[in-house]
Image (cartoon, helix red, strand yellow):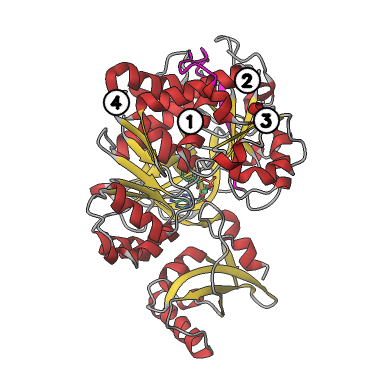
């Protein structure tokens, strides 16, 4: 089951993606050492997640909520099946074809993704903020044959190079419906299709998803995932750490096009028979309002969102909220504490990666140690290795290496060799393990600041600055310096009511010197009105370095 073999026949008539998997000797090791990870050799993840729920009599239970939409499991299944029939019928797609998906979080976007998987096609989800040129690169790399796109986001698709002929819009507003050819409107096409469809009989290792990394530089990398990978992420983190159940209502901000959001806001809730709220473009205020309105129980978002929400909780009734998951970037202890103080909740931090599909190190409840991400979750193992790839002992900073049931397989990309070493996935993170097996994030390997021979991790300095009453947000990077190689530079956003000044800079510098080794203090401080972030909530450090 480890390597691509001819043992189990693929359902794919179009073998493009399979043919562009990395060579077998560049794959990471895959381990399936939990009973729940023993999947049959033929499995379609949507049949397993959605159709089985309906077959088991849960069709009447709520599945997805959105603006003006409340779909039960049976209703979601009908939507999905109509789309499956559109894909197979009028759109003429065959198993293995790639379908690019573009839309903000919305039940229709969710149904479209599920339909592509159920039909045995390969989903290529894309972030709403991507522009025509970037979409063109993805279409070319993944050799996309069709596009399903929210009507509101059509402009960049219409301007994208390499776009296929088969482009269909969904959520077309009534006033635009008349001017649109029938075959361009998913809503119109769906209306003409029956509301039931059989799932494609896919092999467990048939490809169902090519997820592009949100990569800050260079050409984006397409990460390949199988039907069984989708099931594996549902059966690891949610089952063992989050412990979600039927009565839960999920909510949050990560886009469905980001695997953090795809798992946390769609696959995880459906896998346990729970429900999810899918809302577009949430601000911290809007997310708090929606938690109150829907009485959500589990929240998924990035650390910066929790920090902003912590300052606003007073105005909202958040008594329904039981669990909050933070991922995407390191969770500063200061943010963990602010959130706990505001809500009483202990945040579940977890590190995940697009290559690994979802979270692989985390901790919940009494297992939480502030400052640590946690331990490898059941199903995964991890260690810290040196430059040669040899494990280092506790207390030494090195490169994080992980393996589990999922792992990195880039679509036709030489960078596969950088991510996989001796069967381990190297995430590009500098980590340290303690004697109890807890993993502590230090920085991205490339972001370690080296100043006058000292290694300094930006996030450690950030965590101190965030404790200063004047600091709303901050980002710490290395600034080139002739004498020291690099100096520590802090980019600081002040809270309302505080003004940038040399005095304020000196105050922040002294504050850092008092709390951690003085050589780590920011010799340079710059005040900004906001920090550059990706759509997934990650600080764009390269932008801070180049300003
Ligand atoms: C960083 C973290 C410290 C880390 C992701 C959950 O973020 C996700 O995927 P990406 O491919 O980025 C991966 C990189 O992001 N990171 C993520 N979480 C944490 N660093 N603490 C954390 N808790 O550098 C990692 O290598 O965008 C997260 C689930 C699915 C995902 N794709």
Q: Residue 181 shows which numbered tag?
A: 3
Residue 117 in magenta stretch: no
**Label 1 or label 3, whichever comes before in sequence order:** 1
Of circles 4 and 2, the one toward us is: 4
Secondary structure, mark 3, is loop
Percent across and percent down for residue 361 are 40, 43
Q: Residues within 10 Å of mark 1 (few under 14, many from 20)?
A: many
Q: Which residue is mark 4?
A: 60
Residue 198 place in picture, x, y as percent = 48, 13
Q: Which residue is mark 1?
A: 111
Q: Earlier in the sequence, mark 4 or mark 2?
A: 4
Which mark sits nearer the N-terminus, 2 or 1? 2
- Magenta: main secondary structure: loop
* Residue under pointer 2: 96
Q: Nearer the viewer, mark 1 or mark 3?
A: 3
Residue 430 appears at what percent x and percent y? 51, 53
């Amino acid at each position: 089951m480890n390597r691509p073999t001819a043992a189990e026949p693929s359902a794919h008539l179009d073998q493009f993606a399979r043919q562009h998997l990395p060579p077998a000797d560049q794959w990471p090791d895959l381990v399936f050492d939990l009973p729940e990870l023993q999947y049959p050799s033929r499995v379609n993840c949507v049949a397993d997640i959605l159709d089985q729920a309906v077959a088991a009599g849960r069709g009447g239970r709520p599945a997805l909520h959105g603006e003006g939409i409340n779909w039960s499991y049976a209703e979601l299944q009908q939507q999905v099946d109509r789309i499956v029939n559109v894909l197979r019928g009028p759109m003429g797609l065959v198993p293995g074809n790639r379908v690019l998906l573009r839309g903000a979080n919305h039940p229709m976007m969710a149904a479209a993704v599920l339909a592509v998987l159920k039909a045995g096609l390969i989903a290529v989800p894309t972030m709403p903020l991507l522009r025509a040129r970037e979409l063109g690169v993805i279409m070319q790399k993944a050799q996309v044959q069709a596009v399903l796109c929210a009507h509101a986001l059509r402009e960049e698709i219409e301007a994208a190079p390499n776009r296929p002929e088969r482009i269909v819009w969904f959520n077309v507003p009534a006033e635009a419906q008349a001017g649109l050819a029938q075959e361009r409107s998913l809503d119109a096409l769906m209306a003409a299709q029956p509301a039931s469809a059989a799932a494609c009989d896919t092999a467990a290792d048939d490809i169902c998803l090519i997820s592009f990394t949100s990569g800050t530089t260079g050409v984006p990398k397409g990460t390949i995932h199988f039907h069984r990978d989708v099931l594996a992420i549902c059966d690891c983190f949610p089952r063992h750490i989050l412990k979600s159940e039927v009565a839960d209502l999920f909510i949050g901000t990560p886009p469905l096009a980001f695997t953090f959001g795809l798992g946390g806001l769609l696959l995880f809730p459906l896998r346990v028979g729970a429900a999810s709220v899918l809302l577009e473009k949430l601000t911290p205020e809007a997310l708090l309002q929606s938690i109150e309105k829907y009485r959500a129980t589990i929240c998924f978002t990035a650390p910066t969102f929790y920090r902003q929400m912590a300052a606003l909780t007073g105005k909202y009734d958040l008594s329904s909220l039981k669990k909050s998951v933070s991922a995407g970037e390191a969770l500063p202890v200061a943010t963990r504490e602010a959130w706990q103080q505001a809500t009483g909740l202990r945040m579940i931090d977890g590190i995940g990666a697009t290559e690994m599909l979802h979270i692989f190190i985390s901790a919940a409840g009494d297992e939480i140690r502030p400052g640590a991400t946690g331990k490898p979750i059941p199903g995964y193992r991890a260690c810290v290795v040196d430059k040669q790839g040899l494990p280092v002992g506790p207390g030494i900073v090195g490169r994080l290496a992980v393996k589990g049931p999922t792992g990195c397989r880039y679509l036709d990309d030489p960078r596969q060799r950088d991510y996989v070493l001796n069967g381990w996935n190297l995430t590009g993170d500098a980590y340290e393990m303690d004697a109890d097996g807890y993993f502590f994030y230090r920085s991205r390997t490339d972001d370690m600041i080296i100043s006058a021979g000292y290694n300094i991790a930006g996030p450690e300095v950030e965590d101190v600055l965030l404790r200063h009453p004047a600091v709303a947000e901050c980002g710490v990077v290395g600034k080139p310096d002739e004498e020291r190689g690099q100096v520590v530079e802090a980019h600081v956003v002040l809270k309302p009511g505080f003004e940038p000044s040399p005095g304020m800079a000196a105050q922040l510098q002294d504050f850092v010197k008092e709390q951690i080794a003085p050589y780590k203090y920011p010799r340079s401080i710059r005040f900004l009105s906001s920090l550059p972030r990706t759509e997934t909530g990650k600080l764009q450090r390269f932008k801070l370095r180049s300003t």
